[in-house]
Image (spheres, helix red, strand yellow):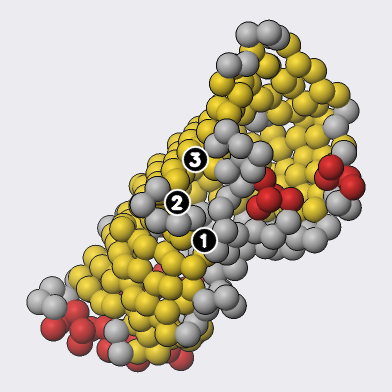
Amino acid sequence: EDRRAEGWVAEVESIETRGFPSRFDTTLTGISLADPDTGVAYSAPFLQIFALSYKPEHLIAVWPKEQSVSSPFGKAEITSDDMRASLIVKKNTSLALEKANYTTDAVTLQMDNGETFGAAKASMAIELNPAAQNAYHFGVNLKDVLLPKPRGIRLEAGILPKTLEFARGDVTAAFDAPWDLNALQSARPQPTRINVKLIEAKWGQLELRLAGAFDVDTTGRATGQITIKAQNWRDILAVSAATGAIPTQLVRPFEQGLSLLSGLSGNRNTLDLPLTLDQGQMKLGPIPIGPAPLFRLR
């Protein structure tokens, strides 16, 4: 009812709670939610939420095998096995996030543009960092990651495997406000600083590692530096060119410049370069590569 009063579409066919007085086992069926301000919508046949009556601040959620999410960027049909999460919030009216864990097996996102994303296993953990204001530590671990097939790359010929062996992230992010009930009801907290302890991925012989930190201004523009270490970087360049991530006319200058830089590092197959972010613009080593993505949450 609160969401409807704020203009949301919020429909639930039924709500049933069992287990009282020792616990609250709640099942919602026929769920349909939509936020007109952000353009985000969600639907699912059911959602289960469990909590002990003497520990109501600790919730466990279980999702169905099929659900749907849409946003201004597109619509995704999600299928998975055993998708669940636990959530611990503070014992106050704001219900500020303290810790959360999420796991799922065999998750697939089928986009309405025909692209498919997925992972054999996926897990994520979030924990409040008490040493800094409104800062949270994020850990992500994906195994056998399926990405949309790059245009022009013959994966079936064995040039690259069809899945990433793994993708992992260890990141701390500070925000301008806490993640609490107000973050869902009104404005989303926006990042102010992101510290990347390590992001790494392995795709066949390609290995990529990132580490560094940057500040984010009120418009979402980033300033800072990320160190990128890439093994077998020529294959990475070929993939970037084939997918359109690097314009065709820049491929040859990139290869020449990166060959020189990798030679200076002592290993022509490995790049160890700073990615400099300056007021929303990016440079890879000394080479300008264009605007950085805006770090804004809808």
Q: Are marks 2 and 1 in contact (CB under 8 Å)?
A: yes
Instruction: Assign a secondary structure to mark 1.
Output: strand
| Residue 175: numbered disc | 1
Q: Residue flagged by tag 2: what amino acid is it? A: Tyr
> On the rendered image, what quadrant is the C terminus found in?
bottom right
Which one is in front, 2 or 200?
A: 2
> On the rendered image, what quadrant is the N terminus found in?
top right
Q: CA distance from mark 2 to mark 3?
A: 9 Å
Quadrant hosting residue 27: top right
* Residue highlighted by disc 2: 136
Say which label, 2 or 1, has the lower sequence index: 2
Instruction: Assign a secondary structure to mark 2.
Output: strand
| Residue 40: numbered disc | none
* Residue shown at the point (69%, 60%) measured from the top left: 187
Instruction: Assign a secondary structure to mark 3.
Output: strand
Label 2 neighbour load within 10 Å: few <14, some 14-19, many 20+: many
| Residue at the extreme left | 266
* Residue highlighted by disc 3: 98
Q: Viewed as shown, does residue 42 lie left or right of 86?
A: right
Residue 102 seen in render? no
Q: CA distance from mark 1 to mark 3?
A: 14 Å
Say which label, 2 or 3, has the lower sequence index: 3
Q: Viewed as shown, does residue 264 lie left or right of 160?
A: left
